[in-house]
Image (tube, rainbow, N blue to C red):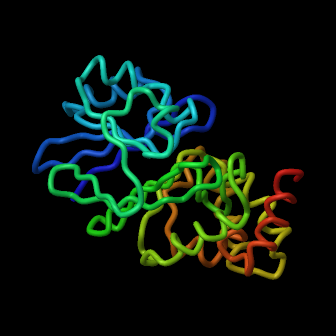
Amino acid sequence: MIEIVRIPVLSDNYVWLVHEPDSAETMVVDPAVADPVLAEAERRGWSITQIWNTHWHPDHTGGNEAIKAATGCTITGPEAEQARIPTLDRTVKEGDTVKLGDVVAEVIDVPAHTAGHIAYHLPDEKAAFVGDTLFAMGCGRLFEGTAEQMYANMRKLEALPDETRVYCAHEYTEANGRYAVTAEPDNQALADRMADVVAMRERGEATVPTTIGLERATNPFMRARSAAELAERRAAKDAF
């Protein structure tokens, strides 16, 4: 069983440090910055061997160069964004796999937030690293893509098993929930979840990872019945 450590950085980013004990390999997902990641790995006695990027934004790749310089790690990221992530050693797209020790991750294309955004699904570990595509009760802004693409992304992700843990890259849950309860005011599961989230944040607790099953029940973007409805909800959230 892999070990996954949450590292909060910047104002609301999460970097994920992932250790596979049999091989002693350690991987970093979307390092916004380097120093806290290197420090946490050193504290645990883990040697970073890989970085997996989901998309090119600097708050997901900003630590690549320094971590690579310090560890000699290999960096994997989206083929469609290789020109924007100059530190990549390997590029991948949907249908490809990457490995951490013997743990296999399947690459899923999820464009919309950025044009080449990808996610990594680890089926045997019941985990998915989704970057800025799916959030707890939310989805990424449509910076470089369309609502139709994001709607398709939601269909891909909701097809994963309910128990799949979703490791997104930001602590946006409470803000997402404030909008979500206005989009689906009659959704009791959503209202109950929002109450839990408010209490968690008041205690200073993180609200991610989430799960596919929880998002299917409470995420207004995953629950949108059409691309047009998702577009309406995304526009409303952007102005909320």
- The residue located at (43%, 45%) in the rendering is 79
Quadrant hosting residue 139: bottom right
Figure label count? 0
Looking at the image, residue 11 sits to the left or right of residue 180; the answer is left
Taking depth in this image into account, of 235 and 45 the one nearest to the observer is 235
Image spot of residue 38 (x, y percent) = 33, 25
Q: Is residue 24 above or below residue 86?
A: below
181 is higher (above) or lower (below) than 238: below
Residue nearest the observer in this picture, 30 or 183 = 30
Locate residue 134: give its quadrant.
bottom right
In the visual, does 85 lie left or right of 229?
left
- Measuring from the top left, give residue 53's x and y in whole percent: 43, 41
**Does residue 99 appear left or right of residue 236 in this picture?**
left
Quadrant where the N terminus sits is bottom left
Where residue 39 appears, x then y in whole percent?
A: 33, 23
Q: Measured along the vertical axis of the image, is residue 162 above or below residue 153? A: below
Q: Residue placed at 84% from the left, 76% from the top? A: 185
> Residue 26, image x and y in percent?
24, 40
Asked if 59 appears above or below 118 in the picture, the reply is above
Q: Nearer the viewer, residue 171 or 153?
A: 153
Query: Which residue is situated farthest in the left direction here?
Result: 22
